[in-house]
Amino acid sequence: MLHDLLYLAQQTINALQQGSIYALIALGYSMVYGVLTMINFAHGDLFMLGAFACMLLAGVVTPLLTAVPPILVFILILLMVMAVIGFLGAFIERVAYRPLRGAPRVSAIITALGCGLLIESLTLVIFPYSQSIPPLLANRTFELMKVADPAGAGAPLTLTITALQILIIRVAIVLMVALDFLIRKTRYGMAMRAISFDARTVPLMGIPVDRIISMTFLIGAGLGGAAGMLYGLAYPVIAPSMGILVGWKAFIAAVVGGIGSIRGAVLGGFILGAVEVLAVVFFESTYRDLISYSLLLVILIFKPYGLLGSAPNQKV
């Protein structure tokens, strides 16, 4: 019994790591939808670019900063990745989405899908094969608990957590708390929430709508880039197609939590991560996606707008 609880605790740690990455990606989907009520289907490919940007920057920055503590090198690369991917997201909004703001919604959806395919195809031309990210930090393993086999026949079961898992969870939490503070306590966040509530009236109050929307894309894409870097460090083999499946899963997490809700995106990400990891505990690994999507579908049946979402206001 104690062995089973220890194994479950180990999988819970893995679920926190996976959920942290899903939550960061889902935040980008929710931010864009909350402001423009559109789904940025290119967001998964920006997540993928975050992993490749980390690989390239690590190859350039790390040799130049050998005398700098590794944790500072990691923070520097993380900020650089977020800046590069963030500005790329803002550029895509300016070039591809802004001209279609008054067009039928299906035009924006098709454009977003096209941008995603363009990013993936260009990355595939440059990197036709899978790549690997060099480790930025020494990934030490910390032993939290060890339980011997009662029968004395097998090896003891150990509850462990790695330095990389701690780092991923801590970085994700810091970014989430910072974003929540930005949205709820700053003038930018107030403007963003105002646009989400009534986009037609906001310009009459002197709020620069285009600038706020560009900032929303910049921050959302930056968070996706950070998630791509963390994912690439946790699962070092990266490929141009990695953004498709992970991006769709994060989109589902955002919908389950309540698309347009910042805290809902975080909740949905952790729920999806927990369901994916813990499903393997009780069932075969081949049933993981089936169980995950089935459970999330059930949640949406009873909560159509997500766990923390709400029905849109209808003016009559």
Image (tube, rainbow, N blue to C red):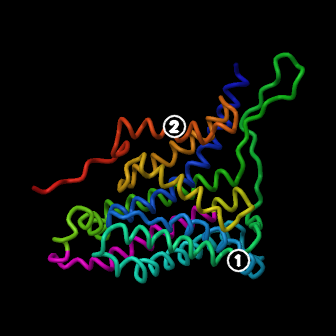
The quarter in which the C terminus is drawn is: bottom left
Q: Position of residue 193 (x, y in %)?
A: 27, 63
Mark 2 neighbour density, 10 Å: few (under 14) some (14–19) many (20 or more): few
**Left or right of residue 277, residue 134 in this image:** right
Q: Main secondary structure of the magenta part?
A: helix
**Left or right of residue 22, residue 109 in this image:** left
In this view of the protein, which residue sits in the foreground, 295 or 261? Answer: 295
Tell me the tag on residue 102: none
SS label for mark 2: helix
SS label for mark 1: helix
In this view of the protein, which residue sits in the foreground, 308 or 249? Answer: 249
6 above or below 133? above
164 above or below 93? above
The residue wearing badge 2 is: 294
The residue wearing badge 1 is: 56
Mark 1 neighbour density, 10 Å: few (under 14) some (14–19) many (20 or more): some
